[in-house]
Image (cartoon, rainbow, N blue to C red):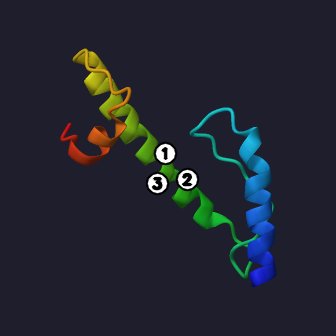
Amino acid sequence: MAELQREILTAVLGQALKFADPWAIHELPFQWSPDGSRAWEEELQEVYRKGVRTVEAHVADHMSRGESLVGREKDLAIRCNC
């Protein structure tokens, strides 16, 4: 198990420089389920996509009111009730 974890970490770090889009999802060639099923990935990706849409909606709401979030990212994370 430790060897697999090292392989995964090495693969993830190897992908870090390839990210052009901060919300991109990169596929890695590892099997997580004993039966080889990768069905869980779609469920996880949907959770990720919902999170991205939520952040984008908050940013759009603030921008529509003429509010810049630059330098105020922590405020958004802590206090935003949009």
Distance from disc 1 to disc 3, alpha carbons, whole Å, reads 6 Å
Looking at the rendered image, the quarter that the N terminus falls into is: bottom right
Q: Is residue 17 left or right of residue 77?
A: right
Q: Residue 73 falls in which quadrant of the image?
A: top left
Q: Residue at x 53, y 59 (%)?
A: 44
Mark identifier at residue 49: 1
Identify which amino acid the numbered label 1 is placed on: Arg
The circle drawn on residue 47 is: 3
Tell which of 34 and 21 is nearer to you.
Answer: 21
The numbered disc on residue 57 is: none
Q: Is residue 9 above or below residue 62?
A: below
Disc 3 marks a residue whose amino acid type is Val
Instruction: Residue at 73% x, 80% y: name it.
Output: 35
Residue 61 point in image, percent of width and height: 27, 26
- Count residues near mark 2 (Cα–Cα under 10 Å), then give few for <14, some for 14-19, many for 20+: few
> Looking at the image, do the residues carrying marks 2 and 3 touch, with CB atoms under 8 Å apart?
yes
- What number is the disc on residue 45? 2
Left or right, residue 59 beside residue 79: right
Q: Is label 2 in contact with label 1 (beta carbons under 8 Å)?
A: yes
